[in-house]
Image (cartoon, rainbow, N blue to C red):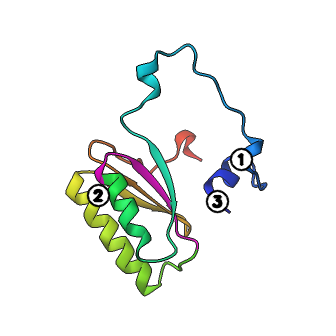
């Protein structure tokens, strides 16, 4: 189950299920954020290149790793590469359950505790 499925109650959703929230109250400069949250799927080693580029560019990446087991040799190599990128930029990296890795750029940390303590 992907992140969006978990956030939206576990059901499968398509792009048509989402509603655009208008930001008319914000000025045009606020709409172009310097940092974005990007979503990726890692199915092979080459997928890491785009993730590394995004983190170097200052974006947060949530990567789906469900195609690999956490004991998979390829996944170990991918994790090592992404850990090195997070270290180089002064960011952070954490694996959430067995299906996601979150990598942040410099100045952005990842809390290891949940809001509300649940």
Instruction: Tell me where residue 81 sits by quadrant.
Output: bottom left
- Badge 2 element: helix
Tags 2 and 1 in contact by the CB under 8 Å rule? no
Q: Residue at x 23, y 59 (%)?
A: 87
Q: Residue at x 34, y 53 (%)?
A: 55
Quadrant where the image shows the N terminus:
bottom right
> Residue 43 at what x, y percent from top left?
52, 74
Viewer-closest of 92 and 33: 33
Q: Residue at x 41, y 21 (%)?
A: 29
Mark 2 sits on what residue?
A: 86
Q: Is residue 56 left or right of residue 94?
A: left
Q: Residue furthest bottom?
A: 73
Mark 3 sits on what residue?
A: 2
Task: Classify 10 Å Cα crowding around label 2: few (below 14), some (14-19), many (20 and above).
Answer: many
Q: CA distance from mark 2 to mark 1?
A: 31 Å
Task: Classify 10 Å Cα crowding around label 1: few (below 14), some (14-19), many (20 and above).
Answer: few
- Badge 1 element: helix
Query: Which portion, as a residue range, is magenta?
Result: 56-66
Task: Classify 10 Å Cα crowding around label 3: few (below 14), some (14-19), many (20 and above).
Answer: some
Q: Look at the image and say whether residue 63 sits in the magenta stretch.
A: yes
Mark 1 sits on what residue?
A: 15
Q: CA distance from mark 1 to mark 3?
A: 14 Å
Mark 1 or 3, nearer chain start? 3
């Amino acid at each position: 189950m992907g992140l969006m499925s978990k956030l939206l109650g576990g059901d499968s959703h398509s792009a048509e299920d989402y509603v655009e929230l208008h930001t008319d109250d914000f000025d045009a400069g606020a709409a172009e954020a310097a940092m974005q949250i990007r979503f990726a799927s890692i199915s092979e080693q080459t997928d890491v290149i785009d993730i590394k580029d995004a983190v170097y560019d200052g974006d947060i990446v949530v990567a789906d790793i469900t195609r690999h087991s956490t004991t998979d040799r390829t996944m170990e190599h991918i994790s090592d590469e992404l850990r090195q990128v997070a270290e180089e930029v002064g960011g952070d990296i954490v694996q959430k359950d067995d299906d996601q890795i979150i990598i942040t750029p410099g100045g952005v940390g990842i809390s290891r505790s949940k809001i509300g303590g649940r």
